[in-house]
Amino acid sequence: MSGSRNSAGKSEKKDQASQADRHRLYELSVQYAPSEIEFVDDTFKSLRGRRARLLREDFCGTANVCCEWVRRRRGNRAVGVDIDPNVLQWGEEHNLSKLTPAQREHIDLRCENVLKTNSVSPDIVLAMNFSYWLFKERKELRRYFRRVRESLAEGGIMFLDAYGGYDSFREIVEERKIEEEGGFTYVWEQEKYEPVSGSLICHIHFDFADGSRMERAFSYDWRLWTLPEIRELLAEAGFSKTTVYWQGWDDNGEADGDFKPVTEGESDAGWICYISAEQ
């Protein structure tokens, strides 16, 4: 049935927000798994002279990236770790279900704490979408980085992302139109930044053409870690080398998605980068 009926027997049409799937909207707005996998796959090859086979995605959510990894090459295997059983179930039903039986057998999803998980030593560990920022104390983040380094196979590499710029310290709202799924607006809200602790409260909302809104579809309580802090903690955790990969810009002033290694960045209002941490 397309709608419900009220006490008078009239059909009530649901608004777009109530019918939308927040996980699907997130994947369309925030993630582009093929680009992310292409970057880590090619960067590992350039640094190690061989292809990685086993990838572990920490804070994996819907396991979209795990699925992309096993699609990329026969023999690739992935481990996805997330503490939320509901999002893992969604990934099973909507992403893993689209794989071939052989590809599905190459993914191991684990409902575990990333600080406690024990898996076969991966070539690559990913911690993307700033997920590791939930560790708000230096000792916590250093402990996580150390656990990752100890879990990696020989020659393994950890990949992270980070964002910053002077807008990242502000309480702002940004909007971006998304054309898929009939069209909607992705809304990023930095509700509160507290400079003494570095605490950052953010939300994702989704607005629709009929005027409805999915309010606080996702919320984050993070610490806004700077690049020097992240690199120092990686070194303290025992990683031998870190590299920052900066995103470029096209002729229209839009981010081009091409990340190059740098030793100096630009003082932009907002930037996103990747980081590799070699064992």
Image (tube, rainbow, N blue to C red):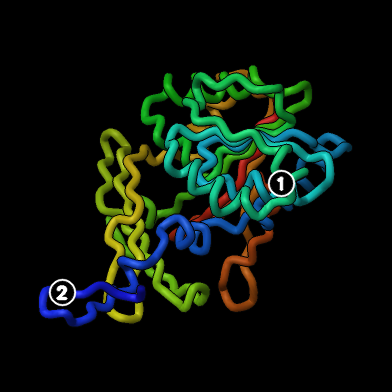
Residue flagged by tag 1: what amino acid is it? Trp
Along the viewing direction, whichever of 62 and 229 lies nearer the viewer: 62
Check the image and report above or below for 7 versus 275. Answer: below
At which x and y percent is residue 4? 25, 72
Closest to the observer, 232 or 266:
232
SS state under label 2? loop
Residue 12, how many percent across, how many down? Answer: 23, 77
Q: What residue appears at the point 57 percent right and 71 percent down from the top-left corner?
A: 254
At 28% from the left edge and 40% from the top edge, which residue is drawn?
195
Circle number at residue 22: none
For the question of whether residue 242 can be seen, the reply is no
- Residue under label 2: 6
Which of marks 1 and 2 precedes in the sequence? 2
In this picture, residue 274 sits left or right of residue 136: right
Q: In the image, what residue type sits under mark 2?
A: Asn
Q: Cβ–Cβ below 8 Å for labels 2 and 1?
A: no
Spot occupied by residue 93 in the image (x, y as percentages of width and height):
54, 50
- Compared to 236, does 32 lie above or below? below
Can the viewer see residue 206 in this picture? yes
Rate crowding at label 1 as few (under 14), some (14 to 19) or many (20 or more) other CA atoms within 10 Å.
Answer: many
Q: Is residue 186 left or right of residue 40?
A: left
Mark toward the viewer: 2 or 1: 2
| Quadrant containing the N terminus in the rendered view | bottom left
- How many numbered marks appear? 2
Residue 258 image-quadrant placement? bottom right
Residue with the mark numbered 1: 69
How far apart marks 2 and 1 lie (CA) works out to 47 Å
Quadrant where the C terminus sits is top right
